[in-house]
Amino acid sequence: MRLGVCYYPEQWPQDMWADDAARMAALGISHVRIGEFAWALMEPDPGHYDWAWLDLAIDTLAAAGLKIVLGTPTATPPKWLVDAHPDMLAVGEDGRVRGYGSRRHYCFSSEAYRVECARIVTAMAERYGRHPALVAWQTDNEFGCHDTTLSYSANAAGRFRTWLGARYQSVEALNRAWGAVFWSQAYRSFEEVEPPNLTVTEANPSHRLDYNRFASDEVVSFNRLQVDILRRLSPGRDIVHNFMGFYTEFDHFHVGRDLDVATWDSYPLGFLEMFGGSNEDKLRYLRQGHPDISGFHHDLYRACGRGRWWVMEQQPGPVNWATYNPAPIPGMVRAWTWEAFAHGAELVSYFRWRQAPFAQEQMHAGLNRPDNVLDRGGSEARQVAEELKTFPDLGLCGRSRVALVFSYEADWLTKIQPHARGFRSLFLAFETYSALRRAGLDVDMLAPDGDMSGYDLILAPTLPVLSEEDLARLDASGAVIVCGPRTGSRTKDGHIPADLGPGPLQTHLSAKVVRVESLRPGADPKVVLDGQAFDAKLWRDDLETDLPALATFEDGKPAWVADGRWHYLATWPGPELMDQVVARLARQAGLTVNLMPEGVRTRDRDGVRFAINFAPEMRSAPAPEGVQFLLGGRDLAPGAVAAWQIA
Ligand code: GAL
């Protein structure tokens, strides 16, 4: 468990560097990430490299004992490069070129840009790949940030056609897969196919789904191009990428397979403001963050990294990019850091060392203020470093007993055809996760093709495309399994299956979805469970089944059915219903539910249980009597952390 920081030496006078490095080391920071936006300084003119400043920066940091994480600078190509290859720019859905002047101004499908990337990465790896202080490479920065995964450029169109050719072999097969007989959409050749934007009304959903799959593969191959070079020229160093929160436009499991460590950028207050659900939650957790937003991503990226993961950027104070940007309560930066360690992080690295007094992010806090005085986030980082000195060095997280299946493709599908405003697989997964965590359960996230063995309970909040293989894997797990609405409702081509939803699931659970409807807020479905009515929302499947209903809609039709260990939910449960569902499933799976005090979450790592209070009021740690605390104690003030050994 180590601490790091993101640092931009190029943004500060050189005579500050040695002092910065010394202060980082004195604070207890061991890793420093640099370089990811500095291409224009590394190569000020085409083919003319200037490494002197970066040599000095790396040597200065290394001399202070810091380990270097070096970013490839491909998220910010220099102006001269854009001028030389204007067609490397992405094109937005509105058909307009996305221009130079901020960052991520490139299209993943530009072959010319890929050649340039390979060149700068090779040059960097040749120069620094074997530097003794270099421990890791970060490829690019936040693939997809600012909506940059999908581009509608001529380059993307060309590569999409090649991708379609490889997938379908014949244009007849493509026409069948897309249902092109509808609205005269038949193509005579792959050459006729365009990206699915600028259509009069919605484009064909199968076309859009394939475009999303293609765009995701483009990110994978773009990353792999860099990974291959780095592996060859810089052996023994970890290769990482920093993913984002609530971002699903490419399949992170697929990118993760080429990495040694998955990392992500955790901004709890920004995420709450931008994505965090009800206004009530946004106000309640304003300065602490939602109790499950970080945890959800920690667990997701732990899965993407096959157990190894870091926080590459940890919020240190107010950010600049949300609609409103409150400051965390005192102690919260420390709490987020411990929360990440509790979920198995090897490293938590703060963004950034010092707040910049200029340019786009001048309103974004750092560990230090712009006048170089240590800010509150900085003292909390120092406190964690002090605490780590005596804290047992923990191994990684073991396997949990509960798994949640998360599918990026499911999210593309529900974005393409939500059918109800707000129906997104991502948020159904998040709300399901949240209920499991309120029940005191640790959760592993799984890709649909992940290893399902050894779990007692597996939840698939929604998996519209349920392949026979995925189903066989679920079956072989022997776990209690619950599938949510829309599971098995589409073939891989995006059609309604011949035997209707839930498709292949019907071999394990004899229920058929004969009609679906979606409902606006205010007309939400109610679900009756043991005589009590609960709120559900947005969605209702009409099931034709002889199975007894565990819960019904108000008109008596089944809302929840089970066939032995297989369960199906025909709606999107509200939080209270979700709690009931989780409690019953847990009981059937032989798991103990420990209902958390509101706002408190626990997480186990290598024999130690952590508790964190996200509520704005005092809480009590759910620890047994007489336990020896490794950190904190039973009384949990807002933002407090406790940890104790478990059997
Ligand atoms: C991240 C990004 C950083 C910085 C940060 C600000 O999305 O990777 O470069 O912009 O946000 O919060």
Image (cartoon, rainbow, N blue to C red):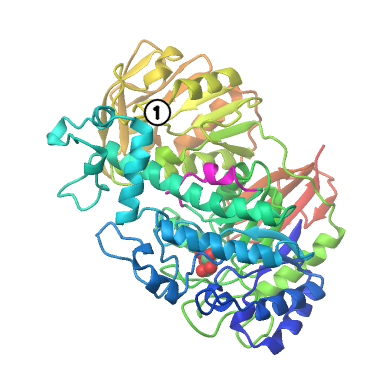
Q: In the image, residue 578 lies at what x, y percent? A: 47, 36
Q: Residue furthest top?
A: 546
Q: Residues within 10 Å of mark 1 (few under 14, many from 20)?
A: many
Q: Is residue 435 left or right of residue 506?
A: right
Residue at image point 72% right, 81% down: 20
Residue 505 lies in the magenta stretch: no
Relative horizontal placement of residue 392, taking residue 575 as reference (left or right): right
Q: Callout 1, which amino acid? A: Thr
**Secondary structure type for disc 1:** loop
Q: Image height check: is 384 above or below 367?
A: above
Q: Which residue is mark 1?
A: 487
Q: Can residue 141 be seen in this snapshot?
A: no
Vertical comparison of 273 with 526: above or below:
below
- What residue is shown at x 34% (from left), y 31% (from top)? 168
Residue at point 63%, 25% (across, down): 453
Report the quarter where the C terminus lies.
top right
Is 251 in the magenta? yes
Q: In the rendered picture of this protein, how many numbered marks are placed on residues?
A: 1
Which is more toward the observer, 489 or 456?
Answer: 489
Image quarter where the N terminus lies is bottom right
Residue 625 visible in rendering: yes
As drawn, 324 above or below 595: below
Percent of width and height locating residue 471: 49, 21
- The answer as to whether callout 1 falls within 8 Å of ligand 1 is no
The x, y position of residue 238, in whole percent, is: 69, 53
Query: Where residue 118 sits: x, y (%)?
Result: 54, 59
- Main secondary-structure element of the magenta-colored stretch: loop
Which residues fall within the magenta stretch? Answer: 247-259
**Residue 50 position (above or below residue 300):** below
